[in-house]
Image: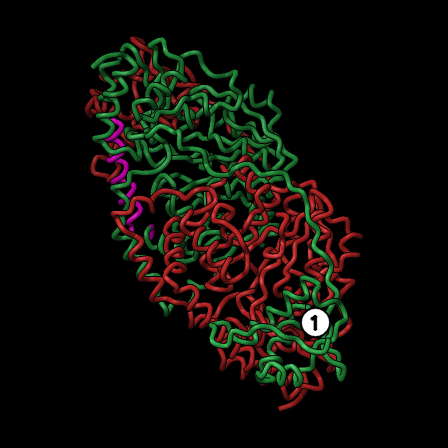
Chain colours: A green, B red
Amino acid sequence: MEMLTFSMDVKGKTPLYRQLYKYIKTEIRASNIVCNTKLPSKRKLARHLNISQNTIQAAYDQLIEEGYITPIAKKGFFVNGLDNILSLDLKQVENLKNIDVNAKKILYDFSYHGVDHDSFPFSIWRKLTKETINEYDKNILITSSSQGSSLLRLSLAKYLRQSRGVDCTAEQIVISSGTESLYQILIQLLGQEYVYGIENPGYEKLNLLFKCNNTKFKSINIDMKGMKIEDIEKSRADILCITPAHQFPLGGIMPINRRIKILNWAYKKINRYIIEDDYDSEFKYSGKPIPALCGLDTNGKVIYIGSLSKSLSPSIRVSYMVLPDLLLKKYRERLSFIVCPVPTIEQKVLQRFIEEGHFDRHINRMRNIYKRKREILIGELAVLKNEIEIIGADAGLHLLLRIRNGMSEDKLVKVANDIGVAVYGISNYYYDKSSVGKIPTVLLGYASIPEEDIRIAVKELIKVWFNKV
Amino acid sequence: MEMLTFSMDVKGKTPLYRQLYKYIKTEIRASNIVCNTKLPSKRKLARHLNISQNTIQAAYDQLIEEGYITPIAKKGFFVNGLDNILSLDLKQVENLKNIDVNAKKILYDFSYHGVDHDSFPFSIWRKLTKETINEYDKNILITSSSQGSSLLRLSLAKYLRQSRGVDCTAEQIVISSGTESLYQILIQLLGQEYVYGIENPGYEKLNLLFKCNNTKFKSINIDMKGMKIEDIEKSRADILCITPAHQFPLGGIMPINRRIKILNWAYKKINRYIIEDDYDSEFKYSGKPIPALCGLDTNGKVIYIGSLSKSLSPSIRVSYMVLPDLLLKKYRERLSFIVCPVPTIEQKVLQRFIEEGHFDRHINRMRNIYKRKREILIGELAVLKNEIEIIGADAGLHLLLRIRNGMSEDKLVKVANDIGVAVYGISNYYYDKSSVGKIPTVLLGYASIPEEDIRIAVKELIKVWFNKV
């Protein structure tokens, strides 16, 4: 190729070398300059375009680096051969926009997600965060160990011992970002070849998690005391996923003898384990807190899972588990390459929040707030004492209503939705729908809905469910 | 049972009802009070112990709730039968303490992890965080959508278009906490039945990740241009995991024609995909940045992975990927139950950091800092120009040294360690060790080591490697 000519934009923002680079690149891609063409020498092209040789050099360097041309010593610059890019007929992808324009406007939401929005300790959290983002502490730029910050684990171990009766060391704790991510680790740790037994009804995400991990699971029906041993045996499950502190969603507390029976079940075979999700256990409104099942276990068969989603906020994404020694050893051998997903700054803020006593104070405060909300909710429902039955222990952040007004569960939910009140049908939480009870039942969470809204919303519900004012 | 007697501690801190509850519980657990025993009535026991009936009621209530006793109407309180807890002979678990007491003290670390510790934008990050933790913004207490905050995804899409030539929408982006967690999602999304092709040498965690997911993978040898098509075909891999911007660890940039060939390879079968890890692509010290491979893809076959670990800090745990439309659809159908692991507050801080231009400024600043460090490192090594060869493009945060001084790679690393300098043998990054080259090669990262330390450490290395002063 003798010479190249292109229209330079001398006054433009783009440097000349980039204009030249882009021009040659486009010409090569369009096959206007073909393979093995020798480009003009730098000297000649510089003279021709009346620009400096350095500019040409910069353009050629970029082309070399991206692989469009190759310099050959004492010969010059040669264009490389480029393959054509194939083109596929892709199936038309349907419109991906979320279709929720037709969703009813919800004014009052009895969701069981979330926490009371007016009670988050904003000023303390802000203060601790501000102090933590400190240029003299270079450790906040380093990822924590695989299991999470050791100081935070120390604080959590102390909290678990004092508040949940779990006798563990900081070494046994693994910190992660949510219950699902802990289950993800546990599936890898325990093995995909085992059968997991999940509660029916239960936490609706568990079956999705096992499915997308190609892991076998069986749903096991529960009564108000939890899973029955004969059903567990029948299911041939190896690993049980249970919520003994406050079953979700039925709200039962597993009594001591069922706990012992389930522990004994686990002790009978080497591969059996119990995953105890100690979901919303901080909130018990009468009597003494009931220690975690893990505290009864003397043989390293219970994996304890805790979370700050209910006690602080789901948006901080912190959960943790306590591994029995044998599993801890396996974790360290096989999974310690996993990086703890919780940001270092946040781990440090949380550690100080717990260590300086703010967490205990916060929980105690929240216990009173949620107790009051529960009382208001139950109080407002008192006029219906003959038509509805309230299910679940005096604990947690939700309750169930068994309603006898002739409406189906779907209908109960729908008429509530139509007036802007969100309640949740219990059948959503059944994996095996054939076990759904005969009496229509809805779930009402009361953590995030304000007190005043509870009063208004229940009055509205009574109107549409019972025609009462 | 006629009556119960126990030693009360009237002046103690523990309330009387708890003392009574604990005493009865212990007696039941020890079988001193057996199944079906009727406990004394509240009235009688209160008179006997000279305490109020309410105290007895509180203790009995707690025992009922935990399942130790059952109230029977008009009959009284009866002790439930408890199973014995089995005991197992567990194998002695070896001492789990980390054994690193014998590790040499490292004074100068050429690790490729981490970032420059003096350049993190502490004051801006602190200011933005302080402003974000705001009691009037209740959204920070709510988890973001499964794919992450939509505002942050908008900012990232804009950044990717402008800086990396990736033409994507915010809808296509999934935010998660680190490259590993993105791969975890991808394995679930693409399926465990496919064979993943990984670079040899390459990122050392990938094979561990596939192993613990029971997912098949093949390591594919690379040259300075990346994987060769014939090797890819031979491996029978379906999905390639590659680092075209700056191969880790060899440091090559994939030239345009290899890019086209690899795209065409992917276009030939419906299940083929390319996972492009755009690892440390922000740092290129000469010429123009080379657009991501994803930008060339017209058929939705490249999954782009980006991370803020190198450009901001690994401790903030933020990474993201761009899904082609078909995979996005599948993600929404099957995996949208996954909660984004990045805390809501941090997502908001990061979004403002990018949107207000701090991120661009930070990258530009860091590019100069790292360029200077690289120049210092290369400058200090210049005296060895006949004995060592520097490998890798003028980019990224590490370089490789091929060293001909008669020492093996292990020996090079060991003598450096002995004087407190950490360098890393290239063979660590080979999954298939049979492909390790013949010339001993070590990796030197220069992101986190201070400039002055580079000068000192290289002088020390020259001493022990070449006996020169």
Image quadrant where residue B357 sits: bottom left
Secondary structure beneath disc 1? strand
The residue pinned by badge 1 equals A69
Q: Is residue B81 visible?
A: yes
Report the quarter where the C terminus of chain B lies: bottom right
The residue at the point 51 percent across, 20 percent down is: A221
Report the quarter where the N terminus of chain B lies: top left
Q: Is residue A359 magenta?
A: yes
Relative to B406, residue A416 above or below = above
Q: Give percent across and percent down for residue A141.
A: 44, 64
Image quadrant where residue B204 sits: bottom right
Q: Is residue B218 left or right of residue A465?
A: right
| Residue A273 vs residue B454, the one in the foreground | B454
Q: Give percent across and percent down for residue B424.
A: 63, 70
Q: Amino acid at mark 1?
A: Ile
**Protein chain holding label 1:** A
* Stretch in magenta: A354-376
Q: Is residue B337 magenta?
A: no
| Residue B145 vs residue B37, the one in the foreground | B145
Relative to A124, residue B46 above or below = above
